[in-house]
Amino acid sequence: MKADTRFFTCLRHAHVYAPEDLGVVDLLLAGEKIACIGENLETPAGLDCEEIDLQGALVMPGMIDGHVHITGGGGEGGYHTRTPELMLSQITMAGVTTVCGLLGTDGTTRSVINLLAKARALETEGITSYIYTGAYELPTPTLTGSVRRDIVVIDKVIGAGEIAMSDHRSGQPSYEEYRKLAAEARVGGMISGKAGVINMHLGDGKRGIQYLFDIAAEGEIPRSQFLPTHANRNRPLFEQCIKWGKDSGFLDITSGINPNDPGSEICVKPAEAVREALAAGVPLKNITMSSDGGGSMPVFDEEGNPVGVGVGDEKTMLTELRDMIVEENIPREKAIAIVTLNVANALKLHDRKGRLAVGMDADLLVLHDDYTLCDVWARGRQMVQEGRPVVKGTFES
């Protein structure tokens, strides 16, 4: 890692999307926070302040990736298919400044303890990190023996996940088990002031999210307690998720699955899925996007046997952000909100993250005209400069 002791940085002539369009303004960063936003800002007299002229370049909040396998994922095809841990620059070079780490299929050879340790390491190296407790199966692995206790007493635990539903790799839990988990997470979130959400992995099973509709119909657990992800995995599932999203539920689209990729031919392209959801009447605030970065992308045959595997890439978030704006004609501020503000609101991180405003964490991206990455600041520290990482993780050369 590279040391940087400068406290003040002034970014001049930035076209800021906060995510709303603020026009061309200056931003003054003070330590880890945004101190001021406005035209022709004066820098602190007599104090060292780096000034950078961005010449009207697009500046937006750092992306919040709510579904990342920071310790790796996979393993469905044997031990050799366990994907590796993510390094710091893999995350920052994707324009991500906040990650929410989780386990997936394998809650046996991978542990929540290991996940927590990795999250703390990434925080030390310069970004912001949170985790979900648990894995695909129910009962799900935890740190303290209880999902509720994990959320209440472990600072970085904001909910449970990735819990599998309608997937042959799940623990095939009953409706009552899902319902009980929802109650555990909800009360844990209430006691601790956290989101207490369940990051719900959706597979290709015919039931889809019917259990979620059934739980919501009882009227005690609100739809906002669930963050159903991989909503664009296949067309029937996507149509269910649109119905869910139109009635106060979150709908999380995975940027890392694309119909051009082997094994994902039946999915809905992420940027197209956003356009379709908005056109169908899903409120903008209910749509989020995450990458599934670091997770395995297994390919199964008709009998459910693994025949290939890839690795999810967080850079797909930037690709789909561009495609939302350029290919699907979604206004910039709306597209940017889907990967920043909406995620912060869903995960109750909005007091620090998701917006460029005075007092918020100084997490921001500078993009080129073609929406490729130029610069990244995370908690006030420049991590990427002109498309190259200037801060690397402990074990990166």
Image (spheres, rainbow, N blue to C red):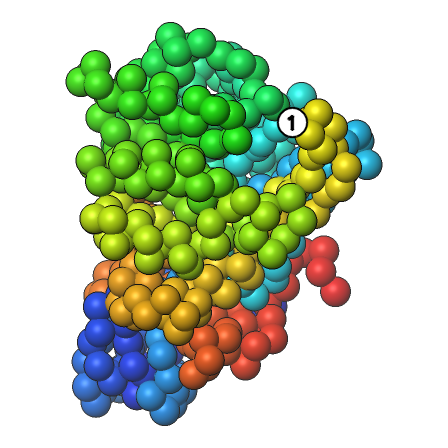
Q: Secondary structure at mark 1?
A: loop
Relative side of 201 to 169, left or right: left
Q: Nearer the viewer, residue 358 or 166?
A: 166
Relative side of 249 to 240, left or right: left
Relative side of 83 to 53, left or right: right
Quarter that holds the C terminus: bottom right
In this view, 180 is above or below 202: above
Q: Nearer the viewer, residue 240 or 73?
A: 240
**Residue to which mark 1 is pinned:** 106
Mark 1 Cα within 10 Å, few/some/many (few <14, many 20+)?
Answer: some
**Residue at 29 percent of width and 81 percent of height:** 15
Count of marks overlaid on the render:
1
What residue type is disc 1 on? Asp
In this view, 179 is above or below 197: above
Q: Is residue 353 visible?
A: no
**Residue at 70 percent of width and 25 percent of height:** 303
**Residue at 41 percent of width and 70 percent of height:** 327
- On the image, the x and y values in percent for residue 289 come to 40, 50
Q: Is residue 24 visible?
A: yes
Based on the displayed image, in which of its 4 quarters is residue 198 positioned? top left
In this view, 193 is above or below 23: above
Relative side of 24 to 145, left or right: left
- On the image, the x and y values in percent for residue 81 come to 76, 37
- On the image, the x and y values in percent for residue 6 come to 44, 75
In this view, 7 is above or below 301: below
**Residue at 60 percent of width and 56 percent of height:** 260
- On the image, the x and y values in percent for residue 169 come to 61, 23
Quarter that holds the N terminus: bottom right
